[in-house]
Image (tube, grey):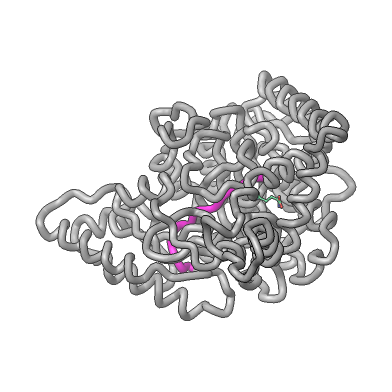
Amino acid sequence: MDEWPKISDIANRVQSGELKPIDLVKKSIGIIDQKAEYRAVISSMEERAMHRATEIENRIGRGGNIGRLAGVPFIAKDNFLTLGGETTAASNILRGFRAPYQATVIERLEAEGAICIAKSNLDAFAHGSSTENSDWFTTKNPHDKSRVPGGSSGGSAAAVILNMVPFALGTDTGGSIRLPASFVGAVGVKPTYGLVSRSGVVAMASSTDVVGPLTTNVEDASLILDIIAGKDSMDSTTIEREESYLNTGDGLRGKRVGIISEYLNDGLDSGVRSVIDKAIDKIKSAGATISRVSLPNLPLSLASYYIICPAEVSSNLSRYDGQRFGYSHRDSNDLAESYELSREKGFGAEAKRRIMIGTYVLSSGYYDAYYKKAQLVRTKIINEFSEVFKNQDLLIGPTSPTVAFKIGDRVKDPLKMYLADMMTVGANMSGNPAMSIPAGNSNGLPVGLQLIGPMRGDRQMLAAAQSFEGLE
Ligand code: GLN
């Protein structure tokens, strides 16, 4: 009923005239309204969506060829600049901000006929692991309303599982696509750093920010990556793409798969552990060679991330001074006071925490002790990954040490919240492609299996995921 066919199927049926884009937009908006209690969505782009649907329908009527996403509705996390509504990054400081241009990825999806329906909830500026840091509201987990959907792309992940749209966009700076994918049972892909343009995406930590899709199956995720990947003159960190990201063959048979020992430690929940153990057995019976690998410095990822990330955040957030974007505190005696009051009132607690930590670790007295040391650790992690991948085609482990936790459980303790990302940040520090795919349930809650590929090995990682998905 509610469920969407595969994306390529929808597009083909729209192109042939069997499905009408306007009906798809209406269906999507209908489900968003019907499931409003989950609070996955911040704002609707209905007017622009209906306009685009009509335009696409007319073009098809004239015999035009629309593209690989003809009429396919999607939701973008509210840190992607989009026309036809506000872009707030779920922060009060961007309340009322209307973007003057769209993110490159949105443009690329639209060029293939996709229709952006709404903007999804996130932790403000993507700082968080649960969406509880949103200045708007907390998104609820589709499997249990008393639990978080994970974060920071929690709205996008929930929207996909609630069948609001066939796919959604997220960003992953330290795990924000993979963690919510794991918590709601979605497929979430963080491509190789630089493979997808960040132009028009609200910057968090520029050296680890990556854009990627959230879907219900691997084939759809590969198609979306195939459309958004590749060089962009608006983002100088983008890299050359491979010819295709669509899967063509068996991704597991004969492959060397390494289990990351550091991720199977005491902190791992036993229910998660048994799901992962079963997944490993399945991968083995699919013809892969399994071995244990060790990356001794990987456990230091989290500590170095929480120095490097705030350092970059403190710099990226300096542009919000109340004069150029969104909220402005006008009732001030002079410009300096206007800056101060706009930032004091506009930023939430987590953004302020990161600005303070970031400014501190970059200050002349502490730069060597913190920032420089964290960068040295980061280099070691990069080297360990490239060393391990000399003998492995793929690494696997859990996406998260636990299943979705209860709303309210970790908000008061930032360190506990930060720990949710202990298994995802490693791939952000190194830049390797990584993804989460549903592997089973523990007490009725989804558990994600994490796959990490070699640098630029996005295609082989997706092929392996698709083979895993097909296993009984
Ligand atoms: N949870 C991590 C953080 O708070 C990662 C967030 C993200 O990937 N955007 O920084």
The front one of 250 and 117 is 117
Tell me if 472 is positioned left or right of 109 in this view.
Answer: right
Residue 173 can be seen, yes or no: yes
Q: Is 164 in the magenta?
A: yes
The front one of 199 and 271 is 199
Tell me if 91 is positioned left or right of 5 in this view.
Answer: right
Which quadrant holds the N terminus?
Answer: bottom left
Q: Residue at x 19, y 62 (%)?
A: 57
The front one of 20 and 194 is 194
Q: Residue at x 53, y 45 (%)?
A: 211
Q: Quadrant of residue 173?
A: top right
Tell me if 190 is positioned left or right of 239 in this view.
Answer: right
Task: Using the image, determine if residue 38 lies above or below residue 297.
Answer: below
Q: Which residues are magenta?
A: 163-173
Q: Residue furthest front?
A: 333
Q: Is 304 in the magenta?
A: no
Q: Residue at x 26, y 66 (%)?
A: 51
Q: Quadrant of residue 122?
A: bottom right
**Percent from the top left, x then y, of residue 8?**
34, 51
Tell me if 393 is positioned left or right of 26 in this view.
Answer: right
Task: Using the image, determine if residue 69 lies above or below residue 301.
Answer: below
Q: Quadrant of residue 290?
A: top right
**Percent from the top left, x then y, of residue 456?**
54, 28
The front one of 126 and 157 is 126
Residue 140 can be seen, yes or no: no
**Percent from the top left, x then y, of residue 2?**
43, 72
Q: How many marks?
A: 0
**Percent from the top left, x then y, of residue 254?**
59, 27
Task: Using the image, determine if residue 295 lies above or below residue 74.
Answer: above
